[in-house]
Image (tube, helix red, strand yellow):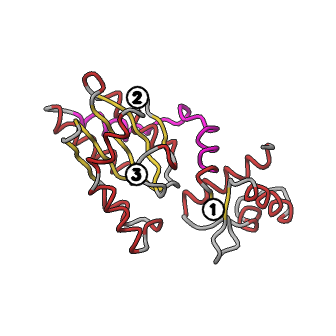
Amino acid sequence: MEQRQEELLTLVIESYMATAEPVGSRFLVDIKGLDWSEATVRNELRFLEEEGFLTHPHTSAGRVPTTKGYRYYVEKIDLEKLHLSRSEDTALTKSFSGDYEPACKSLAKELVNFSGESIIMAFSADRIYYTGLSNLFSKPDFAEIQLVANVSRVFDRCEEYLPRFYSRVDSQPHCYLGKDHPFGELFSCVATRFGKDNESLVVLLGPERMDYRHNWSLVKKARELV
């Protein structure tokens, strides 16, 4: 992919992450202040769509990222580059205190607060805790009734999904998209193993347009604490 195409893909993805609105060439030229003409941008967006990195809803002239587009973006960005704010770091550290399992649950709630996503923690195959479900229901990505049902099903069937995911997750936080995880292609997640002998699992779950860098940093900090 050429540099200009990569820059445009990044702009489309990060704009869509922020607004959940399809991104058009005029928006990119006028709002983002690009030096390229609208026709040039439109042609490059068409190329990115033909290559499978973008698609467009039938009701809109703007583009939205595909799983392939998000995957390219995640592979290219430097996840280590972004650090948590001092307030986030302090709050996460303070939350993890006391007995182990209650401390983990307190930490999970802080992860929900700072990510705006949902957290699933599995201490074993039959000891599962989740919080932040309302965050998913409030997102425009899941506004349709059928999608709400799909979100609910993920949490109802955690005990079925998680054992199949354990073997794919190691002690370093990693972003999982599309078919890389068992929760359904509507979602992406950042996951890592933690605890004694890495027997436990934490999953930060959100829509594909989640803020991957920030969420990765949150899970990395949680892993360090636990």
The answer for how far apart the CA atoms under marks 1 and 3 are is: 21 Å
Quadrant of the image for the C terminus? top left
On whether residue 192 falls in the magenta region, the answer is no
Residue 171: name its quadrant.
top left
Secondary structure beneath disc 1? strand
- In the image, the segment drawn in magenta is 69-96
Which one is in front, 154 or 134? 154
In this rendering, the answer to whether 59 lies above or below 199 is below
Mark 1 — residue? Answer: 64
Q: Nearer the viewer, residue 205 or 212?
A: 205
Give the residue number, with chain letter if any, for mark 2: 170
The majority secondary structure of the magenta stretch comes to helix
Question: Would you name the residue on which mark 3 appears?
Answer: 183
Mark 3 belongs to which amino acid?
Phe
Q: Is residue 142 above or below residue 156?
A: below
Looking at the image, which residue is at 43% across and 71% down? 143
Q: Amino acid at mark 1?
A: Val
The percent coordinates of residue 54 (x first, y second) are: 67, 58
Residue closer to the observer: 140 or 162 = 162
Residue 73 is inside the magenta segment = yes
Point out residue 193 in the picture as x, y percentages from the top left corner: 34, 31
Q: How many marks?
A: 3
Q: On the picture, is 181 further left or further right than 99?
A: right
Q: Nearer the viewer, mark 1 or mark 2?
A: 2
Which element is circle 2 on? loop
Please name whichever residue, 125 or 23, is drawn nearer the observer in this view of the structure: 125
